[in-house]
Amino acid sequence: MSQRILILGATSVVAAEVAKIYGEQGAQLYLIGRNVDKLAALVQTLGDAVGGFEACDLNELEQNAGRIERAHAALGGFDIVLMAHGYLGDQLRSEEDAEYALKILTTNLSSAVSLLIPIVNRLEKQGAGHLGVITSVAGERGRPRNYTYGAAKGGLTRYLQGLRSRLHSSGVHILNIKLGPTDTPMTIGHEKNGLFGEKSQVAKGIVRALEGRKHVVYLKGIWNPIMAIVRFLPEAIFQRFDFLSGR
Ligand SMILES: NC(=O)c1ccc[n+]([C@@H]2O[C@H](COP(=O)([O-])OP(=O)(O)OC[C@H]3O[C@@H](n4cnc5c(N)ncnc54)[C@H](OP(=O)(O)O)[C@@H]3O)[C@@H](O)[C@H]2O)c1
């Protein structure tokens, strides 16, 4: 039987690459994304691999349980769920405008939790399935350049850690994908360097980590040692290095 895969935030460049890999493997995909044109183009590219889709704003939190119910009914169960939607936003604006800061927190944390509750309860009932959620290296430590977004991704990281512990003997696999800077629309205008990930390499890494039942993966892998340092440097030392603690 082909794998039944739900992708949330399917119009993300990274998620679309993952969808193409699974499509080529013969999976049945249910795609949820916000941008109608991008979603329609992806559905067309994937052809018969698409078992259903929905265009919607995942910040309409009260609608999210119904969306998961429809996806579950269309696929007849979930073998893999990938959650990829996210919003970096403008850090400086989030320091002046509370409503805007809440939009960043809602997209990256509240919306994720409103989706994870109905997803995970279904996976637990199945006693099987893989869940991959894209968080960020920005969630590892609060830094001036992105701490509003980082707080949401860090909160999501804690939430996933709790879920993994709750479900450790259930047969359900939970993966936190800690993405580093990647060349996608989210980083348009950011100066690129050798640490930036490339979408197809990142997508392959996500598929490998899901297959390998990893708990946490850094993509690219170089972020693993870098983040070990970022996490553990004492505050007094951290503040002395502008490339770590600056804007
Ligand atoms: N690129 C990076 O450097 C980087 C680094 C660390 C983590 N991440 C995370 O990686 C994931 C994938 O991002 P990406 O790099 O592939 O960038 P992307 O192509 O810009 O994807 C972000 C996606 O999130 C969707 N989205 C945002 N708010 C939404 C909402 N309210 N409802 C539904 N969908 C919404 C966007 O939909 P639209 O198409 O409608 O805009 C877009 O498809 C995100 O979770 C992001 O936070 C990215």
Image (spheres, grey):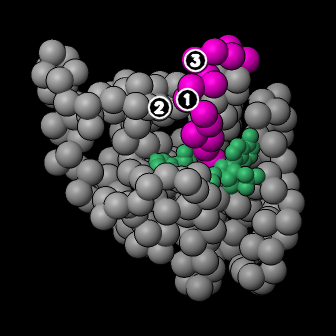
**Quarter of image, res 193:** bottom left
Could you tell me if residue 27 is visible in this image?
A: yes
Q: Mark 2 points at which residue?
A: 146
Report if the CB atoms under discs 1 and 2 are less than 8 Å apart: yes
- Image point (61%, 77%), residue name: 20
Quarter holding the C terminus is top left
Residue 17 percent across, percent down from the top left: 57, 72
Disc 1 and disc 3: Cα gap in Å? 7 Å
Quarter holding the N terminus is bottom right
Pick whichever of labels 3 and 2 is earlier in the sequence.
3
Q: Mark 3 points at which residue?
A: 95
Q: From the viewer's perspective, tell me whether residue 79 is left or right of residue 118.
A: left
Give whichever of 119, 237 is nearer the camera: 237
Q: Name the residue under label 1.
A: 91
Report if the CB atoms under discs 1 and 3 are less than 8 Å apart: yes
Residue 11 percent across, percent down from the top left: 70, 61
**Which circle marks residue 15 in the picture?**
none
Would you place residue 93 above or below residue 49 in this image?
Answer: above
Give whichever of 200, 181 is nearer the camera: 181
Residue range of the region highlighted in magenta in the rendering: 83-99
Disc 1 and disc 2: Cα gap in Å? 6 Å
Give whichever of 46, 52 is nearer the camera: 46
Q: From the viewer's perspective, tell me whether residue 86 is left or right of residue 214.
A: right
> How many numbered dots are placed on residues in this image?
3
Q: Tell me the element at label 2.
A: loop
- Image point (70%, 23%), residue name: 100
Residue 37 percent across, percent down from the top left: 85, 65
- Image point (63%, 68%), residue name: 16
Residue 105 percent across, percent down from the top left: 61, 26
Q: Does the residue labelled 1 lie within 8 Å of ligand 1?
A: no
